[in-house]
């Protein structure tokens, strides 16, 4: 019997390194990223009616991708494409649930793990949902190792916290039995943990320290329950708009039943989805000073902080240039290279939206690139890189001479 040789599934590390955009050597307090991306028949970001998001600009409906969707795509890209040895973070409300799982992995019974996890999260000052003790009241960006660190704290003080664990268990039982209102204006929190020794509370709060985590230093977080828990964002990301009028496509589809027989004809399901085509203009900016202030909160040496800042800049600039939301990609094949990427340092971060108030005529890609280039000549870019990828071999636009032109 022949045995198959395992296929090498690892991505090419050289190609991955070559994709990174390095602007760290360009002088200036800000880095701006402009890109033009042609897209056909996609729905990257839909509204509550499952329609592609759109925006009115220059009296014309344009395809739109929200800044929130772009930020998440970039944040996930940063986590997946940076060194695995670096700490990461996740945005979630499930910190108590994850902490309880870590306790169960270490031998704690599930009935004891849930109240213990809720207790130690509450001890840090983070509010627990009163309708679900495995969730926090609000979503936040927290270090990926926070559940492990919180589990360590509660296990070190397990016997010392016996009374408080019992009280939290009773409080959870009352909430789940409906002795507190389930429907309120805004979700209420369980009462903060009572009688927690300051040593335990301090140790629990340390689990939320942002340290040198790229995603927190870049995208910031809102965590008002903790002293110094809120971290300001060092980036700004605009909603992406198409430079040309949005082409809305109504895609009618049918689903055939593979086991249908005995003379039964017709479809098992009939449906409709909406897709859109257009060339997206995307803009984002990085405040280098804010990034370094955020990273300096870790208490690391200035040299370590500077290295972390430069690595975070490279990761963000590359992510925001290439990463797109993945909605419906299994049936739209939405992965595409941008036609033009410009990443440059400057003294004032300026968007080129005004250059596209008048819709761009066909051929959209080259014409939009020329408009963006004209804007950049007057935008005060100091130094940086540009990447031009034209599938139709169009000539690159006349970019400022301070930009180094290359290919993706």
Image (tube, helix red, strand yellow):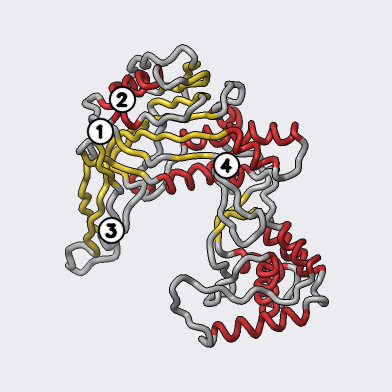
Most foreground residue, 42 or 377: 377
The residue under label 4 is 218
Report whether 343 appears left or right of 104.
left
Label 4, secondary structure: give it.
helix
Q: Residue furthest top?
A: 401
Find residue 50 and report its image quarter: bottom left
Rounded to the nearest angstrom, the CA distance separating label 2 from label 3 is: 30 Å
Q: Which mark is residue 49?
A: 3
Give residue 340's position: percent from left, percent from top.
40, 25
Rounded to the nearest angstrom, the CA distance separating label 1 from label 4 is: 31 Å
Q: Nearer the viewer, mark 4 or mark 3?
A: 4
Query: Taking the image as drawn, is residue 49 in sight?
Result: yes
Mark 1 or mark 3: name the one nearer the start of the chain. 3
Q: Nearer the viewer, mark 2 or mark 4?
A: 4
Find residue 167 and report its image quarter: bottom right
Give residue 365's position: percent from left, percent from top.
30, 26
User: Residue shown at 81%/71% (left/top)?
Assistant: 157
Rounded to the nearest angstrom, the CA distance separating label 4 from label 3 is: 32 Å
Q: Which mark is residue 368?
A: 2
Rounded to the nearest angstrom, the CA distance separating label 2 from label 1 is: 9 Å
Q: Residues within 10 Å of mark 2 (few under 14, many from 20)?
A: many
Q: Nearer the viewer, mark 1 or mark 4?
A: 4
Query: Taking the image as drawn, is residue 101 in sight?
Result: no
User: Residue shown at 46%/12% (left/top)?
Assistant: 401
Give residue 105's position: percent from left, percent from top.
71, 68
Label 2, secondary structure: give it.
helix
């Amino acid at each position: 019997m022949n045995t198959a040789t395992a296929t090498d599934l690892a991505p090419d590390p050289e190609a991955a390194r070559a994709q990174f955009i390095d602007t760290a050597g360009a002088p200036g307090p800000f880095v701006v990223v402009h890109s033009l991306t042609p897209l056909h028949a996609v729905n990257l970001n839909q509204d509550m009616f499952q329609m592609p998001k759109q925006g009115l600009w220059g009296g014309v409906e344009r395809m739109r991708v929200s800044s929130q969707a772009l930020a998440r795509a970039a944040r996930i890209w940063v986590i997946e494409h940076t060194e695995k040895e670096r700490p990461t973070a996740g945005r979630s409300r499930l910190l108590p649930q994850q902490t309880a799982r870590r306790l169960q992995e270490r031998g704690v019974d599930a009935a004891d793990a849930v109240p213990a996890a809720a207790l130690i999260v509450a001890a840090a000052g983070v509010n627990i949902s009163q309708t679900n003790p495995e969730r926090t009241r609000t979503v936040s960006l927290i270090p990926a190792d926070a559940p492990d660190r919180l589990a360590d704290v509660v296990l070190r003080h397990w016997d010392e916290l016996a009374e408080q664990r019992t009280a939290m268990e009773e409080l959870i039982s009352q909430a789940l039995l409906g002795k507190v209102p389930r429907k309120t204006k805004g979700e209420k929190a369980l009462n903060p943990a009572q009688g927690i020794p300051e040593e335990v509370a301090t140790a629990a709060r340390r689990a939320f320290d942002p340290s040198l985590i790229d995603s927190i230093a870049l995208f910031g977080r809102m965590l008002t329950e903790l002293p110094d828990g809120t971290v300001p964002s060092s980036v700004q990301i605009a909603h992406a708009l198409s430079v040309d009028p949005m082409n809305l496509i109504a895609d009618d589809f049918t689903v055939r039943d593979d086991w249908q027989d005995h003379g039964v004809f017709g479809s098992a399901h009939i449906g409709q989805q909406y897709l859109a085509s257009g060339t997206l203009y995307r803009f984002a900016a990085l405040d280098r000073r804010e990034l370094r202030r955020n990273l300096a909160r870790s208490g690391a040496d200035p040299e370590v902080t500077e290295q972390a800042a430069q690595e975070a800049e490279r990761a963000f600039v590359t992510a925001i240039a290439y990463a797109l939301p993945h909605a419906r990609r299994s049936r739209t094949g939405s992965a595409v290279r941008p036609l033009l990427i410009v990443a440059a340092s400057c003294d004032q971060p300026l968007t080129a939206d005004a250059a596209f108030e008048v819709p761009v005529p066909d051929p959209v890609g080259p014409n939009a690139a020329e408009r963006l280039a004209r804007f950049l000549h007057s935008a005060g870019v100091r130094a940086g890189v540009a990447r031009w990828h034209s599938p139709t071999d169009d000539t690159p636009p006349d970019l400022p001479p301070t930009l180094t032109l290359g290919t993706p």
